[in-house]
Structure formats: C-alpha cells, structure tokens
Image (cartoon, rainbow, N blue to C red):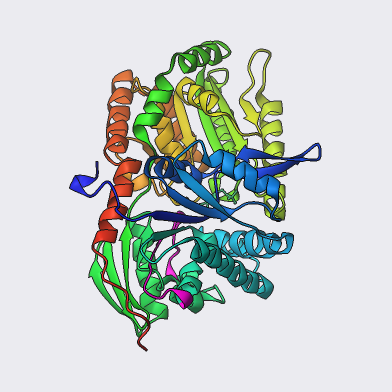
C-alpha cells in the first residue's frame, strides 16, 4: 500500500467528472437509473465509497424532483453525496458527443482522421466546463480538495480559478496524452494546454503520457519553465506552478479477488464451462468503441481458424461489447461492422455443436462478469490505444488460481506494468495476434501459472489504494498557488 504515503486526507475530497456511477433511462414513461460503465467509474466508485466526500457529475438533461430523490436515496447507501449537473440536449450534442467524443477522444487516441473539428463544439465545451466549475464552486469551500477527472473537463480549473484563485484543484487524465505531431492538429491546442496549467496537479496514466504532455508544453508554450524529469515535472508559468506526475490507475484488488472466490461465482463458472466441453475459451470484453480494436481482433481470430485448421473446434471466443455513445455515427457504424464480421466468421467456420464466436451486445452484471473471467483460460485485450485498460487487471485478479493467459496490446496503458507476465501484441498485426493465441493455447501449465502469479502480484502491489495514496502524497507536497501575477 503506497510506500508509506498517507492513506487519508484531512480535507474533504470533491470529485468532479462528466459521469457519476448512475445514468438515467426513460422506461414506460418513468425515469429509471442504471449503472454507468467504463474505466473511470470502476476506479473511482470504490475510492469514494471508502473515503467519502462529494461527487459532482452529470445527471440527465433537466432538473427534476425525481432525479434529486433518486440521487438522495443512492447517496444513503454510502458515505458520499452527489451534486448533479444538468446538461441540456444541445450541450450533450455539442460538448459531450461533439467536442469530447468527436475531437478529444479520437485525437488523444491517435485517430486524427476520425476527428470532427467543428468550431461550435469548442464554444459548447467551454460553456459546459464552466457549468461544472460553477456547480463545484457552489458546493465547496476553500479548504476542499477538488479533483477533476478526464478529457471531458480539461478546462474546469480555468473557470474555477476565476472565482477561487487559491483553491487546490487537481486533475487526472484517464485517457492517453498524444505526441506533439498529433496534438498540434487541434485548433485549440494552446487554450487546452493553458487551461491545464490552471491545475495544481495533473496526474496521467503512464510515463509515455507524461513525456508527450511535457513535449507538447515545451513545443507550444515555450515561455513556460519546465523542471524535473522521468515521472515528475513542475511547470512554472504566469498562472503559478503545476506538478505533473504519472500515476497508473488500478482496481480494488482485494474486493475483486474476494468477489471472484464467492461460491455463486464458482458455480456459475462451472456451468459456463460445461457449455464448452473440451474447448479453450478466449474472452474479449470492451465498451463498443473503435479504440478497442474489436474488428482487428476478430480478423486475427479468423486468421487463426483459416490458417490453422487444427484449432477449429478447439477454441471459442466469447466477445462481449457493452453499448456506448450510441448517438455518435462512428459508433453506430462500428456496431454494424463488428456484427457483420461476427456473422461472416461464424458463417464460414461453424459446425454442428461448435460456434467460433459467442457475441453479446449488452452489459454484464458483476457476478456474471467474474464467472466469465474465471471461465476463460485466455483474455484477448487488444486496444489500438488505451489510457490503462482495467479489464486486463480485472481478468488477472479474478484468476485466483493463477491460471489463465493474458494477451495484451502493447498500446494499452497497462502494458508497461503487465508486460512481464502477459503476451504482448501489436493489435494491428493480425498474424502476430493469431500467433499469440496459438502460444496461449499451447502454453505449459507451469508457465501459465508463473506468468499469472507475476501479474497478480503486480496488480496487488499497485492497486487502487496505492493510486489513491500516490495522489494524496502528491497533494501534500504541492506549493501554494498564488493568484495570477502576470
Ligand atoms: C472511458 C473514459 C471515461 C468514460 C468512459 C465511458 O473510460 O475515460 O471518461 O466515462 O470511457 O464513456 P462514456 O462516454 O459512456 O462516459
């Protein structure tokens, strides 16, 4: 646990993120809540449950007594409260779907050709970032620690400081930060960087993200002074000093391992395995997103079956895709592309009693997820680029008997930590991924065991508590921010 770093904070923690763990759907004329998905939620929810505080985040498009009641009753189940932010339909289109998910998301994942640089999006992005800042301002005091999360809210500190220049405002970026040749395409690159420097502390996932952010700052804000090296930097500019640190996010290891050992999970695992007698099960679980490399993975799986007949009837791929960002055209196109590929692969190779790909397009409740992880002797996690990828850490943690092989993209943020135990692959290399699958199928039990032991030790030693302690320790050492001097 965190190398003797503090595990508590004597100030109130206020988390600000676009999403809270609840979202709303209209069902039969009623608003009902459903759990939200994604890496940010999986990491922050256990942390806030343990620590308490306040979570500021979006809660539908219109304020209503019904929503406030649902938030109150959800808050009664744990030690933190919610402050809702209401994002209108227009703002949702331009700030969330537009700037966040058609500009920053693809660009920061190196997929510049998917960006839509629409000027209107930028106006809305600022407007909504201001709205989040105001919601946080209304509910907080000078002494609170404000911790803003992710790419939807890069500019919150900028607006927050207009009213409270000396507050402690930190940020964590859950997605990658791109290299300068990519970042420079952003028409608002200078404003984004300057806005980031209104934070006291910026956490990024990996050393590579930190290198990229520092290179962008050097390139595009040359008058700022940058000190430090490796995983810790300080940037001095007219707004004050900003610390930048790489702090890889993780999961609640103990809670996950305990959950995976429950009798109900073991029973369910046995019943899943019974459905696939004598077969290897490879699992893929992703939000439906083009950064996750799902079509590329399916093509690699097809290459295995096409080029190595001996593996037909030997392996099934259980692919779960969790619906995501369904109003955005790229995501709709991706869904049909994936479904066409699944159906053509199954059409080409299925035989009575064996279907190569079991495809699911829905979210999976936690117990079922744990049972699926444990049933699968291979995890195929091949994002084209990913901030971290907590599914990789969850899969290993669930394998409490140290069985299971992790095949992991070298472009996932988790690769530097998990590279020693996983089989690392280039997700664009169809033949290479097919080859990794063969290696996983053929791997001797002893090697599997040793690799998985190593992976699980690594995750246990750097879990979500270590991440929290890292953040708290970084906060303790921050210089006081003075009001702008320039
Ligand atoms: C990623 C992002 C999160 C986001 C999640 C789900 O994990 O880093 O910020 O919440 O995806 O995406 P959504 O757009 O549904 O919030």
Q: Residue at x 66, y 59 (%)?
A: 87
Placement of 325 over or under 138, stated as above or below: above
Q: Position of residue 58 (x, y in %)?
A: 60, 54
**Would you say residue 373 is visible in this rendering?**
yes
Q: Residue at x 57, y 17 (%)?
A: 313
Looking at this view, is 455 or 380 the one in front?
Answer: 455
Image quadrant of residue 230? bottom left
Q: Position of residue 181 (x, y in %)?
A: 46, 71
Point out the stretch of residues depicted in magenta: 162-180
Placement of 156 over or under 89, stated as above or below: below
Q: Position of residue 44 (x, y in %)?
A: 44, 46
Placement of 339 over or under 485, stated as above or below: above
Looking at this view, is 162 or 300 the one in front?
Answer: 162
> Which quarter shows the N terminus?
top left
Image quadrant of residue 238? bottom left
Q: Residue at x 49, y 15 (%)?
A: 264
Q: Position of residue 28 (x, y in %)?
A: 81, 36
Looking at this view, is 279 or 331 the one in front?
Answer: 331
**Would you say residue 117 is visible in this rendering?**
no
- Is 270 left or right of 287, judged from the image as shown? left
Q: Is 166 one of the magenta-colored residues?
A: yes
Q: Residue at x 69, y 45 (%)?
A: 66
Q: Is 189 one of the magenta-colored residues?
A: no
Which residue in the rendered view is the most extreme toward the left? 4
Image quadrant of residue 335? top right
> Which quarter shows the C terminus?
bottom left
């Amino acid at each position: 646990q965190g190398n003797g770093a503090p595990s508590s904070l004597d100030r109130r923690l206020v988390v600000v993120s676009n999403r809270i763990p609840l979202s709303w759907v209209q069902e039969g004329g009623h608003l009902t809540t459903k759990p939200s998905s994604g890496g940010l939620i999986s990491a922050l929810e256990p942390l806030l449950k343990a620590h308490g505080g306040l979570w500021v985040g979006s809660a539908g498009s219109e304020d209503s007594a019904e929503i406030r009641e649902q938030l109150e009753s959800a808050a009664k189940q744990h030690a933190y409260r919610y402050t809702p932010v209401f994002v209108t339909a227009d703002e949702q289109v331009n700030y969330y779907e537009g700037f966040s998910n058609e500009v920053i998301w693809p660009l920061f994942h190196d997929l510049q050709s998917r960006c839509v640089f629409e000027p209107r999006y930028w106006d809305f992005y600022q407007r909504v970032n201001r709205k989040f800042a105001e919601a946080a301002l209304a509910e907080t005091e000078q002494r609170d620690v404000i911790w803003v999360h992710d790419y939807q809210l890069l500019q919150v500190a900028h607006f927050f400081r207009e009213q409270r220049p000396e507050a402690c405002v930190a940020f964590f970026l859950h997605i990658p930060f791109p290299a300068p040749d990519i970042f420079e395409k952003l028409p608002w690159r200078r404003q984004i960087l300057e806005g980031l420097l209104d934070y006291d502390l910026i956490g990024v996932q990996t050393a590579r993200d930190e290198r990229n952010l520092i290179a962008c700052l050097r390139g595009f804000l040359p008058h700022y002074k940058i000190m430090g090296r490796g995983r810790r930097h300080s940037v001095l500019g007219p707004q004050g000093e900003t610390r930048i640190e790489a702090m890889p996010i993780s999961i609640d290891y103990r809670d996950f391992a305990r959950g995976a050992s429950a009798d109900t999970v073991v029973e369910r695992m046995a019943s899943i395995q019974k459905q696939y007698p004598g077969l290897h099960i490879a699992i893929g679980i992703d939000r439906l997103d083009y950064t996750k490399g799902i079509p590329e993975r399916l093509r690699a799986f097809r290459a295995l079956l096409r080029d190595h007949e001996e593996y037909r009837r030997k392996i099934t791929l259980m692919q779960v895709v969790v619906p995501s960002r369904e109003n955005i055209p790229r995501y709709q196109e991706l869904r049909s592309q994936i479904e066409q590929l699944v159906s053509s692969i199954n059409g080409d190779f299925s035989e009575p009693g064996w279907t190569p790909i079991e495809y699911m397009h829905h979210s999976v409740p936690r117990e079922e997820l744990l049972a699926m992880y444990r049933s699968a002797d291979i995890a195929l996690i091949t994002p084209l680029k990913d901030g971290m990828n907590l599914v990789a850490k969850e899969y290993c943690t669930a394998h409490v008997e140290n069985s299971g092989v992790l095949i992991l993209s070298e472009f996932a943020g988790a690769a530097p930590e998990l590279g020693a135990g996983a089989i690392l692959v280039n997700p664009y290399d169809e033949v290479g991924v097919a080859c990794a699958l063969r290696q996983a199928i053929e791997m001797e039990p002893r090697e599997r065991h040793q690799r998985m032991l190593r992976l699980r030790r690594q995750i246990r030693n750097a879990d979500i508590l270590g991440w929290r302690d890292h953040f708290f320790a970084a906060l303790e050492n921050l210089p006081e921010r003075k009001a702008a001097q320039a």
